[in-house]
Image: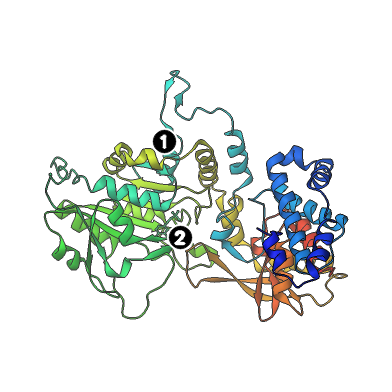
Amino acid sequence: MRGNPCYLRAMPEERPRDLAAEARKLPKADRLLAAADRAGFVARLGHAPVMELVRSALEDARERVMAGEACPASEEIEETLLRRLGGEARGALRRVVNATGVVLHTNLGRAPLSAAAAAAMQAAAGHVNLEYDLEAGERGDRYGHAAPALCRLTGAEDALVVNNGAAAVMLALAALAEGTPARDGQPPGPAPGAGADLPEVIVSRGQLVEIGGGFRVPDVLRRSGCRLVEVGTTNRTYARDYEAAAGPATRILLSVHRSNFRLSGFVHDATLAELVELGRRLGLWVVEDLGSGALLPTAPFGLPPEPTVGERVRAGADLVCFSGDKLLGGPQAGLLVGRREAVARARRHPLLRALRVDKVTLAGLAATLAHYERGEAAAQVPVWRAIAQPVEALSARAERWRAALAGAAPGAEVRDARSAVGGGTLPEVTLPTRVLALPSPDPDRLSARLRAGDPPVVGRIEEGLLLLDPRTVLPGEDEALVAAVRAALVVP
Ligand SMILES: *Cc1c(COP(=O)(O)O)cnc(C)c1O
């Protein structure tokens, strides 16, 4: 469309000739393509992507000419093209230095993985015994790889791994809604017969939460083929509310952990133990959507208590669902742990095929769980290592950055600030930290330059200062961070 003759006709009388003459000075596509080829981009990216950028570089230049500017020098167009190709070659998904101080930053990929987890995932890139029993030489169980460790770490009878926390909840509801548990010598009950009401799931009004990324408990429930029965009020729900609402179509009592917000004041929730007692008495499943799924107690880290998976399993929930990449600190995954019969139903459900987890994830998860089994999680799982960093260590690191940048950022100073856990866990909880504060006449621009760097560095702006928090910068990233900051501070 650009450079269309109609466009020219709309210009003032004597302009068209000038513009056309200028436009003829634009370099030929072939010349730009040859430059890209000499720089090795055709070999790295392939012909078509390079040609697309060549055309767009030429179009941009032509647009400037049509707007009345002089034709840019061929060298300038070439340089722009090579810069864009460089960006493309670094790949769409890039390593980023997280200097935000948000430990579980969902937009930055949540939990960073340990070296052992990364190595295990790399090793799983080839052929693995994913569904192959090496001893027997026959088909094995994909889900057998992480389950024993999950059972040992949580006290559960059985465990299952799917793609993410949302998938775990969906599968738990879909699978358990199809029947009732076997209890006290009673055989398990059937699914509600044809023509019967949809199976019902009872949830407290205070727990009908939205987690983010479009995960809303009422919607997930409906998609799982269940009918939602709300009980209680926003702030107070009692066990007797669940009991009063339970009818012949009821299958599940669902408890949802309020991961990302707090209720305070005149508040009451039925405890999980009360729901378990009620479930036993009425022959109903009890499912807990726990969200962050801490395997370690949080209090020793100076955090408010967060229920651990083991506590919830011990409280007697049939299934506890949680994420692999929140406080567990592993790859994106959804875990279901709990009673044998309940996990077996989830494993048999046809939905599992659509939610199943891949070999690379399983390898990373197993390696992450191994850190917990060896009792080294606080030191080896990056999420916990970041949370556990003492202020003195953070301060010393920020001071080292300041010293290294003294020439480039003379006004930089180390000051007190707060880091957050994030990832929809531990809302409003912050940890004391020490950050490097960069003064700038235009902090938004500095922030943009840092994001455009190599590697991109993401910080945060507070009170007109750009803050870089060492808590979330991985060990070994200091040099890259300092170099990237120095480059961003050099005003072109
Ligand atoms: C985070 C969360 C989920 C969703 O888990 P994903 O792994 O993000 O899919 C579901 N329920 C609760 C309570 C959560 O906190």
| Mark 1: secondary structure | helix
Q: Which quarter of the figure has residue 123? A: top right
- Which corner quadrant of the figure contains ligand 1? bottom left
Left of 385 or right of it: where is 137? left
Give yes or no for contact between labels 1 and 2 (Cβ–Cβ under 8 Å): no
Residue closer to the observer: 294 or 11: 11
Ligand 1 is within 8 Å of the C-beta of the residue at disc 2: yes
Numbered label tally: 2
Label 1 near ligand 1 (CB < 8 Å): no
Residue closest to the eye, 359 or 446 = 446
Q: Is mark 2 on a helix, strand or loop?
A: loop
**Which amino acid type corresponds to the residue marked 2 in the rendered image?**
Gly
Residue 475 placement: quadrant:
bottom right
Would you call the spot at circle 1 few (<14 residues within 10 Å), some (14-19), or many (20 or more)?
Answer: some
Q: Name the residue under label 1.
A: 143
Question: Seen in the image, is 131 located left or right of residue 438?
Answer: left
Q: Disc 1 versus disc 2: distance between alpha carbons?
A: 27 Å
Tell me the quadrant of the picture where the N terminus can be found: bottom right
Is residue 19 positioned above or below 189 on the image? below
Looking at the image, is mark 1 or mark 2 nearer the viewer? 2
Q: Where is residue 59 in the image (x, y as percent from the top left)?
A: 73, 57
Q: Which of marks 1 and 2 is nearer the N terminus?
A: 1
For disc 2, the marked residue is 213
Name which residue lies at 46% across and 35% down. Answer: 145
- In the rendered view, tell whether residue 472 sits above or below residue 39: below
